[in-house]
């Protein structure tokens, strides 16, 4: 518990800024129960009102939790969600944020990740860098992304707001991942064109290089070793699942490429796109699924100006 408790204290004290007397809710499922218990212990050290809810494991990232869980989230001051599948891009999370809850989702978190890597970053420094990247995305209209493995994608973000996942969630309504460290934005629907080659990681059950051909904002063709499994996952969620929902930039220098999307997408020097739902962060598509794919050493241009070159940020 010692190493787990160290990461849990960072989450509760530094990242969430939990105060004495606040109502802290930890939502988990059986595979993540040890992480949840560490978070509960760290919260109780601060004399908070703590509640633990253990729900059944869901089917996919972005699936809505049970109604009772959603209602409890809205009633809390702080929500920590170490779960197997992500609650970030759900209406339950959105409504809880709108009600003023500060929320950190922790999908696929492991005990090892609580003790090492991105979770132990200096989140004040991560916050500064992430806000700079988000500000650059905010000012942009057109994004061009290329990478050595073959990614060549263009998309519009005109009029869209970027979100800085800073790891510092102290203001009512703040939300993000833990571990944190990315700036992300919802592309304008129908504008993404080109190809994405995922050579980092994508979805917990999908391993190997994936090529995604994108036309008019949709993933039209998916190829590569894991293509059948990914396509099946998307098809089960419905036709809106193939929407190009997100473009994100990793900003955590402590993050490692370990085959777990939660940490991989935070790696400094990487970018990612997501397919599926973007209705919870400025987009218009409700899909009931959200899956991220990471690619390495990208070059990113915003309105022709370089934001990142071969994986090195220029902000």
Image (cartoon, helix red, strand yellow):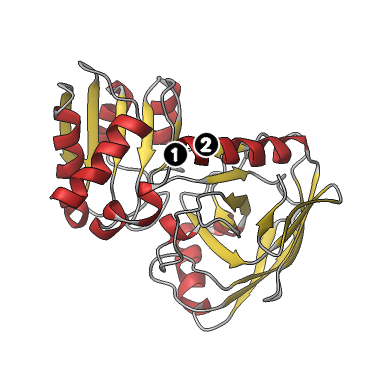
Q: Position of residue 67 (x, y in %)?
A: 28, 35
* Image quadrant where one finds the C terminus: top right
Residue named by callout 1: 123
Label 1 near label 2: C-beta < 8 Å? yes
Residue 41 visible: yes
- Residue drawn at (75%, 34%) of the image: 159
Q: Position of residue 128 (x, y in %)?
A: 57, 35
User: Is residue 24 or residue 54 the one in the foreground?
Assistant: 24
**Which structural element holds mark 2?**
helix
Q: Is residue 91 left or right of residue 271?
A: left
**Which structural element holds mark 1?**
helix
Rendered position, 160 above or below 144: above
Q: Position of residue 130 (x, y in %)?
A: 58, 40
The mark found on residue 36 in the picture is none
Residue named by callout 2: 127
User: Is residue 157 or residue 56 the one in the foreground?
Assistant: 157
Rendered position, 38 above or below 13: below
């Amino acid at each position: 518990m010692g190493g787990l408790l160290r990461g849990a204290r960072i989450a509760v004290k530094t990242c969430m800024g939990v105060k004495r007397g606040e109502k802290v809710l930890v939502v988990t499922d059986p595979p993540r129960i040890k992480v949840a218990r560490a978070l509960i212990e760290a919260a109780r050290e601060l004399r908070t009102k703590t509640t633990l809810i253990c729900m059944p494991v869901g089917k996919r990232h972005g699936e809505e939790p049970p109604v009772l869980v959603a209602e409890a989230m809205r009633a809390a001051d702080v929500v920590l969600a170490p779960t197997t599948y992500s609650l970030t891009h759900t209406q339950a999370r959105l409504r809880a944020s709108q009600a003023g809850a500060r929320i950190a989702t922790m999908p696929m978190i492991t005990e090892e990740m609580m003790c090492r890597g991105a979770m132990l970053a200096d989140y004040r420094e991560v916050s500064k860098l992430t806000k700079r990247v988000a500000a650059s995305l905010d000012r942009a209209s057109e994004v061009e992304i290329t990478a050595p493995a073959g990614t060549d994608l263009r998309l519009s973000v005109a009029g869209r707001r970027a979100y800085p996942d800073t790891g510092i969630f102290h203001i009512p309504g703040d939300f993000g991942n833990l571990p944190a460290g990315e700036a992300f934005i919802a592309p304008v629907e129908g504008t993404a064109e080109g190809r994405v080659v995922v050579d980092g990681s994508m979805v917990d059950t999908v391993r190997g290089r994936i090529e995604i051909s994108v036309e008019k904002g949709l993933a039209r063709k998916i190829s590569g070793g894991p293509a059948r499994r990914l396509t099946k996952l998307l098809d089960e969620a419905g036709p809106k699942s193939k929407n190009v929902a997100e473009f994100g930039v990793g900003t955590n220098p402590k993050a490692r490429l370990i085959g777990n999307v939660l940490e991989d997408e935070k790696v400094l020097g990487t970018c990612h796109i997501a397919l599926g739902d973007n209705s919870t962060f400025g987009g218009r598509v409700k899909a009931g699924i959200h899956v991220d794919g990471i690619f390495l050493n990208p070059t990113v241009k915003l309105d022709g100006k370089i934001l990142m070159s071969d994986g090195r940020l220029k902000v």
